[in-house]
Image: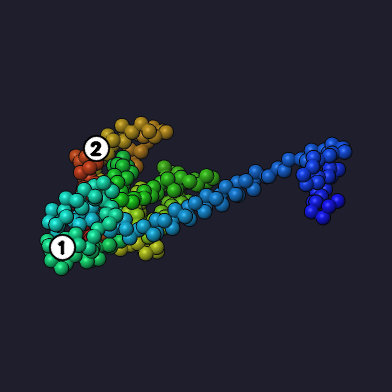
Amino acid sequence: MRDDEIVLGVGDASAVEGEDVEVDDARTPARAVRIPAERELDALELAQQVDRLEIGLQLERRVVEARLAERVARRRVVERADTEHLADGPQLRDRCAKCRGRVPHVSPETDEGAHGARTLADRLGRVDVTPLPVYVISGQLAAGKSTVAKAVLDRHPFGYHVDVDGIREMVTSGLASPLAWTDETSRQFGLAIRASAALARIYANAGFAVAIEGGIDPDAVESALDEVGLRDRMIGVVLRPRLDVALERNRARTHKGFDTSILEGVMREIDGDLARDAGRPGWHELDSSDQTIGETVDAVLRLASAAHQKAG
């Protein structure tokens, strides 16, 4: 063999660089390697965790931009002057529309001449970036709590809906029914409310407006939000349409997997409870009997705005 030749031994076969391989005897094919299904699932879950982490980091990097963009798009570009008063107003307004409220780049010279030495960049540095609200929407059955919660969040660039009943019903064994109330029912509702507050903290701290929604005990949710540092951002809303309206809406619900008439007794009890709790500090009762969803949402947002102004 020459010095520059390489011999590779593979079972009964020998290969010399530049020459064909000669096989004396055929070898038994190697068995396929089988990966247990559990390992495949572990790998898949790990990949999903990495993806979620990357998404979370991206959201964290953009939260300040999102909050700033909301104020620019919804209120005014700067403290009192809207785009009509800026030297470059039409161009800036057009850019806002094209990027759905986000201003990708604003030159410091944009408003020179209109406001002298006070530039747009200087004003943007003083735009209010207070934390977004945490709405807690409770009230009567069939009052439209879920619909209102989602519609309120649609008014924000980022919104996260926390369905307390949905979290409670994730119990797969031993779920306690609210139709036959026991101590275990109370315990599971309490756990669901605490879990809801924990989720609210994660998303609120990432720049999301959050709406916690369901048949919620005020004391329990206030305590849970206090534990996670969100109590001062809570906007408590109680949807209380007239009882006859609520009962009619309940009868019209067809998406439930049971006869909704069994809820009518509970609804009458809830109406009495809501009447007794009326005027609770931090909570606002809305009679949505004759309102459209849009009108109810406007009322909720006015409450949030008033709370913000009072806190400021």
Q: Which part of the image, by quadrant, shows the C terminus?
A: bottom left
Residue 202 location (% of width, % of height): 41, 58
Query: Contact (CB < 8 A) between labels 2 and 1?
Result: no
Residue 195 location (% of width, % of height): 44, 55
Give the residue displayed 38% in from the left and 33% down from the top.
255
Residue of label 2: 245
Give the residue displayed 16% in from the left and 60% down from the top.
111
Mark 2 and mark 1 lie on one chain; the one further toward the N terminus is 1
Give the residue displayed 84% in from the left and 43% down from the top.
13
Q: Nearer the viewer, residue 117 or 30?
A: 117
Q: Nearer the viewer, residue 278 or 171?
A: 171
Position above or below: 71 against 126: above
Q: Nearer the viewer, residue 246 or 34?
A: 34
Residue 276 location (% of width, % of height): 26, 53
Q: Amino acid at mark 2?
A: Val
Q: Nearer the viewer, residue 234 or 107?
A: 107
The quarter of the displayed image where residue 231 is located: bottom left
What SS does tag 2 mark?
helix
| Image mark count | 2
What SS does tag 1 mark?
loop
Q: Is residue 274 visible?
A: no
Q: Is residue 172 visible?
A: yes
Residue of label 1: 112
Q: CA distance from mark 2 to mark 1?
A: 57 Å
Apparent side of residue 134 relative to residue 57 in the rendered image (left or right): left
The quarter of the displayed image where residue 29 is located: top right
The quarter of the displayed image where residue 284 is located: bottom left
